[in-house]
C-alpha cells in the first residue's frame, strides 16, 4: 500500500469548513493548526500539551501492538475525534507513527450506515478504499495483523452491533449485508488479527464492543488559550473572546470542544468586526449563529420560515426516535425538497448530495435543541403545551428548557422574527405561565438541583423584573448551594445581582472553590449579608476574590469554619477584612497559628469586627498574646471572643487580663472552653474582673482543669462592686464542696450581677444544692438561668431547687437538671414548682429515670401552664405506650 497515495488521498479529501461543523480536519492538519485534544489519562498524570501529543499516539500505538486489537476513542461531540483520526493517518503516511502497520484504512460509519445490498469484504474494500490496490488484497488476507481500520462516527451508525442478531461471516469473499460485514469485522470474525480504532460519542453500541477505551476530553484551558491566540491576530481580541466564552453561562459545558471553540471564534470575530455586542447567554449565541447562517441564503422571510420549520420536524424526529441521521427520503417528508441545496450550512451531509444514499445529520445536539425551541414558538399551526413537549423529548434533551427560556423574551427573539416572521404569542404566553409556576414550586422545595435549574432559566431569560417576580420571600434562598459548578455560579450570581441583595449566601461544603468560581460568585458575595463557606475547600486563587467582595460589599457575617484555610491563605483574606463591614467572623478549625495578620485586622481603623470565633485552632499562648495585644488598640471593636480548644495555658491569661483592664477593650464575652488555664489562669483573670475599666459580662471557663483552689479568687472578684459579669460557666471542672460554697457566698452578695450560672458536672453534693436553693430564695440573687446537670444528687438534692422555684423571690427562668438521678418521686415537687412559679419557662430533665407513671401528670401541668414554654424529657425510661400522651403537649420534647 503506497503511503504517498494514501497521503494524497487524505489531503485532497473533499469537504468545506462550516460554522457548525467546524474547520475541515485536513485544513487544520495542513495549516499546522492542530492542537491535540486532551485525554483523561493525560489529565490524571497532569501532563502538559507537548507531552500529551505523544500520550494519545503512544497510548493507541502501545495498546494495538499488544494483545488488545481494539481501541475505542470516546469523546463528546466536537471533541476532535475525527481530526485526531485523520492526523494519525497523515502521521502514519509520513512515517512518523504506527509504523508496525502496513495498511491503514479510514471509514465513516455514518456513510456506511446507508449502504444497502450484499457485499463481500473484497468488494467493499475495492468500492470504498479507491487508493487500496486490488493486488494487495491477498497480502492483507494473508497477514491481517498488518492492517489497522479506523472507524469514525460509531454513534451515528444506524444498525446494531449485537453479535447475537448476526450470522457472523469469516469468508472475505462471501457476500453478506453491510451490517453483517461491519459486525463480522469488529467482532474479529473477518480478518482475525486486524486492529481497530473506533471513534464515537458515548453510545449504547459500546456495550457490544470489547477493547481498551481512551477518553478524549477535548480542550482544557491551556489548549483553549493556544487555540484562541492562533485564531485571533490581536492578543487583546483573543483574550477578550476567551474570557467571555469561559465566563458565560452554558459555554462551560461545551467550550472543551475544539469544534465549539472554532464556532465561537468565528462568530465572535464576526460580531467584533461589526462592532456588535458579544452574547451573554447560550440562547443569544445561537440566535446570532442562526442569523449568521440564514442571511447569506438570501431567501424570502416565508422561505426562511419554511426551512427552519422543516429543520424543526427533522430535529423532533432525530430526538424523539433517536435517529442520529436521516435519509434523503425522510428529508423530503420533512419538507426539505426545495431546500436540499441549502441545508449544508445547518447539517452534516454524508456522501454525495446528488446520490440517493446520502444521509443528513445535525452537527451538534445544541443546534438540534435550539431548532426545537425556535420551532415551538415559530409554528403557528399547533398549540403544543410545554409539558407535552418536555414529556415527548424526555431524556433526549439537555438544554431545551434553557433555549425556550431565552427565546421567550422579545428582546432576544426579535432578530429571529426579523428573518423568520413573528413568533406565536400564545406559545410564548404558554411557556411563561409554565416557567413562572414551575419555578415558584421548585424554589419552595429543598432540592438544590431544582433551584440551580431555575437560576439557569432565569439567567437565559435576562429579565431582571422576572427574577424579582419569581424569587419572592417564600423562596428558600438560604438553603445550601455548596459544590456549585461554574455555570451554577454564573446563574446564581446573576440572580442575586438582579435581586440587589441576599440575606444569606450558603455555600456550605463547596469541595473546591476555584479562582474562576470565586471570581464569578464575587458579585453575589458582595451583595450577601451573610456568607457561609463552612466545610469548604478554598483554592488559594479564590481567596483574593472573597477578600475583594468583602471590601466592596455589605457582608456582616462570614463563616469559614472547617475550611482549613491556614495562615498563608488567611493573610490574603485579611486584605479585605481590614476594610469591610464584617461584624461576625467564624474561623473554627481553620488551622490558624500565627494570629499576626488577624491582630492587624483588629487594630485597623476601618475594621468593624465585633464577634470572633477561633475555636479549635492551635494558636497557643503566642498567637493568643498577639490577639490580646490588639485588644489594647482604640480601633479594636471586638466584643465577643471564642478561643475554645486553642491550646492555651495560664501563661497567656495575664495578657488577657491586662487587655481587659486597659480601658480600651470592648470585650463583653470570652469563651475559654477546653483550654488548660488551670487555677493560676483564673487567678489572673479574677484580678481584671475587679478592675473598674473591665467591661466583661460573660466568662466561659468550661473544662479548664480547675479545682476548688480557684474559687477564692472568683469569690473575691464576684464580691467586687466593679464586677460586671452576668454569665459565669464553670461546668466540667472538679470544684470541691468547699470551693462551691465560696461561690454561693459570693453569689448571695446584694448587687452580684450574675444572671446565668453553669455548674454542670462539677461534683456538687446535696449540701451545695441546698445552698443554691437558699440563694434562689434569698431575694438578693439575680439568677435567671441555672445549669447543674450531671451532678448525681438524686431526688433529695434537687428538691431544694424545686422548693426554691416555688418561692416568690426566685427569678429563675431556665433550670437544667439533666442526669441528676431523678425518679418519679420528684414529679409532685416538679408540678408544684411549675404551678407556683411566675418566671420558669424552660426545664431540662433529660437522661433521668422517670417512667410512664409520671407522664400524665407532667403533660397536664405543662398544658395548664401559661408561663412554661419547654420541658425536655428525652432519654428517660418511657415506653412507646405513652408516646401518644406526650404528643398531646407540643411543649414537651421526648
Image (cartoon, rainbow, N blue to C red):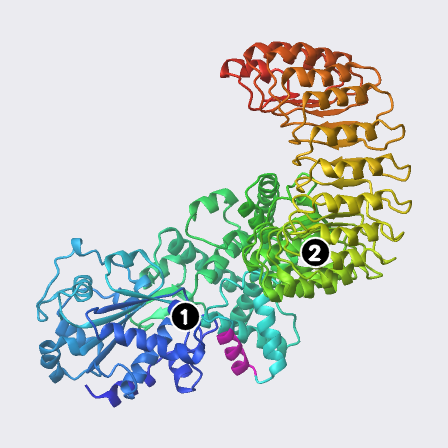
Q: Quadrant of residue 727?
A: top right
Q: Is residue 779 left or right of residue 509?
A: right
Give the quarter of the image for residue 515: bottom right
Image position, residue 18 (x, y; %)? 45, 74
* Spatial CA span between label 2 and label 1: 43 Å
Q: Which residue is mark 2?
A: 621
Residue 210: where, in percent of width, then height? Answer: 23, 61
In-front residue for pair 560/745: 745
Q: Position of residue 27 (x, y in %)?
A: 41, 83
Q: Is residue 682 above or below residue 352?
A: above
Q: Tell me the magenta residue range.
A: 222-232
Residue 48, image x and y in percent? 45, 76
Task: Indicate the secondary structure of the residue bearing disc 1.
Answer: loop
Horizontal side of 334 relative to 695 (left or right) equals left
Quadrant containing the C terminus in the rendered view = top right
Q: For the stretch drawn in magenta, what is the main secondary structure?
A: helix
Inspect the magenta stretch and tell me whether residue 229 lies in it. Answer: yes
Label 2, secondary structure: give it.
helix
Q: Earlier in the sequence, mark 2 or mark 1?
A: 1
Magenta span has 850?
no
Q: Which residue is mark 1?
A: 45
Instruction: Name which residue lies at 40% across and 79% down.
Output: 51
- Within 10 Å of disc 2 (Cα), the crowding (few <14, some 14-19, many 20+) is some
User: Relative to 753, is 586 above or below?
Assistant: below
Amino acid at each position: 500500500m503506497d503511503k504517498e497515495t494514501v497521503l494524497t488521498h487524505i489531503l485532497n479529501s473533499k469537504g468545506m469548513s462550516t460554522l457548525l461543523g467546524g474547520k475541515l480536519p485536513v485544513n487544520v492538519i495542513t495549516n499546522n493548526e492542530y492542537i491535540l485534544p486532551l485525554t483523561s489519562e493525560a489529565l490524571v498524570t497532569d501532563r502538559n500539551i507537548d507531552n500529551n501529543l505523544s500520550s494519545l499516539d503512544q497510548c493507541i500505538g502501545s495498546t494495538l501492538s499488544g494483545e488488545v486489537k481494539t481501541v475505542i476513542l470516546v469523546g463528546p461531540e466536537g471533541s476532535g475525534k475525527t481530526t485526531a483520526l485523520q492526523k494519525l493517518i497523515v502521521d502514519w503516511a509520513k512515517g512518523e507513527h504506527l509504523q508496525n502497520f502496513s495498511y491503514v484504512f479510514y471509514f465513516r460509519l455514518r456513510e456506511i450506515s446507508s449502504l444497502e445490498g450484499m457485499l463481500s469484504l473484497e468488494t467493499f474494500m475495492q468500492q470504498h478504499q479507491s487508493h487500496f490496490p486490488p493486488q494487495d488484497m491477498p497480502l492483507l488476507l494473508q497477514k491481517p495483523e498488518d492492517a489497522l481500520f479506523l472507524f469514525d462516527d460509531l454513534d451515528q451508525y444506524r444498525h446494531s452491533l449485537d453479535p447475537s442478531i448476526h450470522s457472523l461471516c469469516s469468508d472475505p469473499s462471501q457476500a453478506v449485508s453491510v451490517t453483517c460485514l461491519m459486525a463480522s469485522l469488529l467482532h474479529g470474525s473477518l480478518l482475525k488479527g486486524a486492529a481497530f480504532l473506533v471513534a464515537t460519542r458515548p453510545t449504547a453500541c459500546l456495550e457490544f464492543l470489547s477493547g481498551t477505551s481512551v477518553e478524549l476530553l477535548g480542550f482544557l484551558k491551556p489548549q483553549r488559550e493556544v487555540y484562541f491566540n492562533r485564531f485571533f491576530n490581536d492578543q487583546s481580541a483573543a483574550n477578550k473572546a476567551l474570557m467571555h466564552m469561559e465566563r458565560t453561562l452554558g459555554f462551560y459545558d461545551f467550550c472543551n470542544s475544539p469544534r465549539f471553540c472554532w464556532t465561537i471564534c468565528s462568530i465572535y470575530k464576526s460580531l467584533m468586526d461589526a462592532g456588535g455586542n458579544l452574547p451573554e447567554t447560550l440562547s443569544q449565541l445561537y440566535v446570532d449563529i442562526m442569523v449568521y447562517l440564514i442571511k447569506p441564503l438570501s431567501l424570502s422571510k416565508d422561505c426562511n420560515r419554511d426551512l427552519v420549520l422543516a429543520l424543526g420536524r427533522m430535529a423532533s424526529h432525530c430526538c424523539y426516535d433517536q435517529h442520529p441521521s436521516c435519509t434523503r427520503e425522510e428529508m423530503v417528508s420533512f419538507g426539505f425538497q426545495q431546500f436540499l441545496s441549502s441545508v449544508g450550512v445547518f447539517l452534516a451531509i454524508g456522501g454525495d448530495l446528488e446520490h440517493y444514499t446520502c444521509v443528513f445529520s445535525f452537527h451538534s445536539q445544541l443546534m438540534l435543541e435550539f431548532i426545537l425551541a425556535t420551532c415551538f414558538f415559530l409554528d403557528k399551526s399547533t398549540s403544543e403545551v410545554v409539558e407535552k413537549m418536555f414529556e415527548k423529548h424526555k431524556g433526549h434533551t439537555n438544554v431545551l428548557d434553557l433555549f425556550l427560556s431565552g427565546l421567550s423574551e422579545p428582546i432576544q427573539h426579535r432578530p429571529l422574527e426579523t428573518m423568520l416572521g413573528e413568533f406565536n404569542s400564545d406559545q410564548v404566553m404558554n411557556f411563561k405561565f409554565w416557567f413562572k409556576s414551575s419555578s415558584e414550586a421548585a424554589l419552595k422545595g429543598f432540592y438544590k438541583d431544582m433551584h440551580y435549574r431555575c437560576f439557569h432559566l432565569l439567567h437565559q431569560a435576562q429579565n431582571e423584573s422576572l427574577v424579582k417576580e419569581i424569587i419572592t420571600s417564600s423562596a428558600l434562598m438560604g438553603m445550601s448551594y455548596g459544590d456549585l459548578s461554574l455555570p451554577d455560579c454564573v446563574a446564581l450570581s446573576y440572580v442575586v445581582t438582579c435581586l440587589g441583595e441576599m440575606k444569606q449566601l450558603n455555600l456550605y461544603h463547596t469541595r473546591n472553590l476555584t479562582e474562576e468560581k470565586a471570581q464569578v460568585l464575587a458579585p453575589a458575595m458582595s451583595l450577601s449579608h451573610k456568607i457561609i463557606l463552612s466545610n469548604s475547600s478554598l483554592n488559594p486563587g479564590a481567596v483574593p476574590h472573597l477578600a475583594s467582595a468583602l471590601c466592596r460589599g455589605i457582608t456582616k457575617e462570614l463563616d469559614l469554619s472547617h475550611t482549613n484555610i491556614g495562615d498563608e491563605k488567611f493573610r490574603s483574606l485579611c486584605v479585605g477584612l481590614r476594610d469591610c463591614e464584617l461584624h461576625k467572623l467564624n474561623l473554627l478549625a481553620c488551622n490558624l497559628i500565627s494570629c499576626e495578620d488577624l491582630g492587624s485586622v483588629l487594630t485597623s481603623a476601618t475594621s468593624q469586627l465585633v464577634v470572633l470565633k477561633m475555636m479549635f485552632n492551635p494558636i497557643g499562648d503566642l498567637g493568643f498574646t498577639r490577639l490580646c495585644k490588639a485588644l489594647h488598640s482604640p480601633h479594636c471593636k471586638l466584643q465577643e471572643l471564642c478561643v475554645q480548644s486553642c491550646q492555651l495555658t495560664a501563661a497567656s491569661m495575664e495578657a488577657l487580663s491586662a487587655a481587659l483592664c486597659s480601658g480600651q477593650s470592648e470585650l463583653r464575652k470570652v469563651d475559654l472552653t477546653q483550654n488548660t488555664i488551670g487555677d493560676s489562669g483564673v487567678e489572673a483573670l479574677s484580678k481584671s474582673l475587679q478592675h473598674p475599666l473591665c467591661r466583661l459580662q460573660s466568662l466561659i471557663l468550661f473544662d479548664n482543669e480547675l479545682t476548688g483552689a480557684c474559687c477564692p479568687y472568683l469569690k473575691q472578684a464576684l464580691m467586687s462592686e466593679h464586677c460586671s459579669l452576668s454569665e459565669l460557666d464553670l461546668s466540667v471542672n472538679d470544684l470541691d464542696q468547699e470551693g462551691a460554697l465560696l461561690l454561693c457566698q459570693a453569689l448571695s452578695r446584694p448587687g452580684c450581677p450574675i444572671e446565668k450560672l453553669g455548674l454542670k458536672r462539677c461534683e456538687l453534693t446535696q449540701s451545695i444544692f441546698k445552698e443554691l436553693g437558699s440563694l434562689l430564695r434569698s431575694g438578693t440573687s439575680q439568677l435567671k438561668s441555672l445549669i447543674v446537670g450531671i451532678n448525681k444528687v438524686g431526688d433529695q438534692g434537687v428538691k431544694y431547687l424545686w422548693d426554691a422555684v416555688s418561692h416568690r423571690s426566685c427569678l429563675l427562668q431556665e433550670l437544667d437538671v439533666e442526669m441528676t438521678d431523678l425518679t418519679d418521686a420528684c414529679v409532685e415537687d416538679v408540678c408544684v414548682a411549675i404551678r407556683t412559679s411566675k418566671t420558669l419557662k424552660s426545664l431540662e430533665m433529660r437522661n433521668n429515670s422517670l417512667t410512664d407513671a409520671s407522664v400524665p401528670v407532667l403533660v397536664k401541668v405543662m398544658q395548664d401552664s401559661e408561663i412554661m414554654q419547654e420541658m425536655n424529657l428525652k432519654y428517660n425510661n418511657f415506653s412507646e405506650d405513652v408516646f401518644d400522651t406526650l404528643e398531646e403537649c407540643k411543649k414537651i420534647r421526648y
